[in-house]
Amino acid sequence: MKEKKEQRTIIQSESINVYYDDKHVLKNVNLDIKEKTVTALIGPSGCGKSTYLRLINRMNDYIPEFHFSGTIVVNGKNIYDDSVEVEELRKDIGMVFQKPNPFPKSIYDNVAYGLKIQGIKNKTVLDEAVESSLKQAALWDEVKDNLKAGGLSLSGGQQQRLCIARALAVQPTILLMDEPTSALDPISSAKIEELIFELKKQYTIIIVTHNMQQATRVSDNTAFFYIGDLIEYGKTDELFMNPIHEQTKKYITGRFG
Amino acid sequence: MIELILKFSAFVSIGTTMGILYVLLSESIPFFREVSLIDFLTDTQWTPLFTNKHFGILPLITGTLTVTLIALLVAVPLGIIIAVFLSEYASPKFRRSIKPILEILAAIPTVVYGFFALMTVTPILQTIIPGLSGFNALSAGIVMGIMIIPMVSSLSEDAMYAVPKSLREASYAMGANKFQTAFKVVIPAAFSGIIVSIILAIARAIGETMIVAIAAGQQPRFTMDPTVPIQTLTAYIVQVSLGDIQHGSLEYKTIYAAGIMLFAITFLLNSISFYLRKKYQEKYI
């Protein structure tokens, strides 16, 4: 993870506070993320890491109890500004969920979904997008003869790669992954990790994970959250080798969590 | 002992069904000795109570189909729109309070619907369609459609509500809005449940008796014209059962023939819905 050329900051978060009604789930969090890096968010359950992840594409908006203050600037735009159209924002930010959630449609239609809802009907455009996305998600060779098969007919690991392909098809700049391998077997998980390594050449990836080894394997930077506080944030190897805070040390050495 | 009571209860319902089937068959077999099955299924006149007797079931079937079709044209779009609204747009509180109110529609006695069709809907329709007869399939069909809306909306809404949140989230995260998510993800995912609700609504519409007996007229006609009086299978059975037809006569047996036809149609529809439910049940619903 040596320093490459000067990387642009793509996500700036300043004094973020999130409440679910009275519950203070993120406390004055400041976190900047560089372009084309992999950032791992770690911490025990309920620490606010998933909430932070879902702030970036405003998926928390659907929770009625959700209250937010602070600013998050993505690609130079304050995404909680009133002028921001959430649908537009999300076209630039793909998301992969904990459990593979392909639509009950064919493999092809799953990947083409994002483009179709944008009104793109041109078959050649869709065909090319489906092929290139499935290739990027390392699924093309397994499904290319069977694009009309249902997305749910695939194995769990394949389904998750299908979901990655679906997210990539709209050409986002950022990819959010919420524990993307926690429901998968080790071999499928390893494939997804390899994929993350490939994808960071083109995308900025933020991944929530409970798996310390996974964080060290795939990420450049790691942020450790604990009960709503961002305790420590830095280069992954430094954070795991020489944690500054006692809490971090306890967590990464497995004394709690 | 308890087991015995339970077994007995189960047997009562099966036994009743079997008994009905037996009566229908045993009474209609003599009918088909006198009237050929070919005539029954192809003759376009149904005049068993006249001197010039014809025993073609087709007019009663077209009457039934016309009313059912109109009812579906009302109930399916409205029912699905209501279901989408309740499942995707309404707040949980609103949803909880509006659903029982909607289901009251199903609790109104059908005789009330019948009079509503005859006394209210038909006069209104007559101002729009001048040539509309006082008894017609249109009015009966529309009112029947209103009656079966809760069947479609309630079962469809259950199916849509059961679609996992994760699918909606996936759609929203792709930049889809609520409308796109509802129509491109939720409805397709709930499709089997929606189809089942529609088939059950069809079966209900075909079996519905009171509204058509009151508002659709008593004239078996081989037509799909919704503006003229017609007669459905059920309305015919009512007419004959109430009339002074001699027990055991051929005319009397016609109601069993009509009954077995009705039974065959609803049984077929129930079987289709059962089959679809088994076959297309997505694993997460």
Image (cartoon, coloured by chain):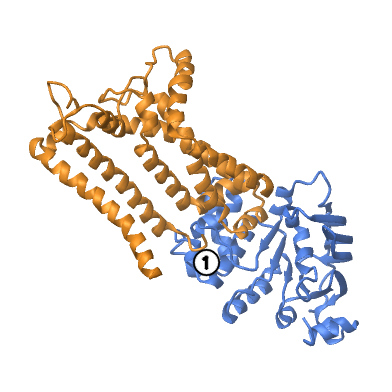
Residue B169: image location, x then y, percent: 65, 57
Judging depth in this view, the residue of B89 and B68 nearest the camera is B68
Q: Is residue B278 visible?
A: yes
Label 1, residues with CA under 10 Å away: few <14, some 14-19, many ≥20? many
Quadrant placement of the N terminus of chain A? bottom right
Q: Chain of mark 1?
A: A
Quarter of the image that includes the C terminus of chain A: bottom right
Most extreme residue toward the left is B34
Depth check, front residue: B199 or B205: B205
Identify the image quadrant of residue A200.
bottom right
Viewer-side residue, B165 vs B144: B144
Q: Chain B's colour?
A: orange
Who's the residue at 41% across and 31% down the image? Answer: B70
Give the colour chain A carries in the figure. Answer: blue
Q: What residue did someone put label 1 on?
A: A140
Q: Residue at x 57, y 81 (%)?
A: A187
Horizontal relation, residue B42 to residue B284: left or right? left
Tell me where residue A53 sits by quadrant: bottom right
- Residue B235 versus residue A6 in the image, above or below: above
For residue B2, above or below residue B246: below
Q: Amino acid at mark 1?
A: Trp
Foreground pick, A1 / B70? B70
What residue is shown at x 48% (from left), y 58% (from top)? A106
Q: Is residue A144 above or below residue B137?
A: below
Local SS, label 1:
helix
x, y (%) of residue B82?
57, 40
Q: Position of residue B79 (x, y in %)?
A: 51, 39
Whether residue A125 appears in this view of the structure is: no
Residue A186 point in image, percent of width and height: 59, 81
> What residue is shown at x 78% (from left), y 59% (from top)?
A55
Left or right, residue A217 beside residue A136: right
B81 relative to A29, above or below: above
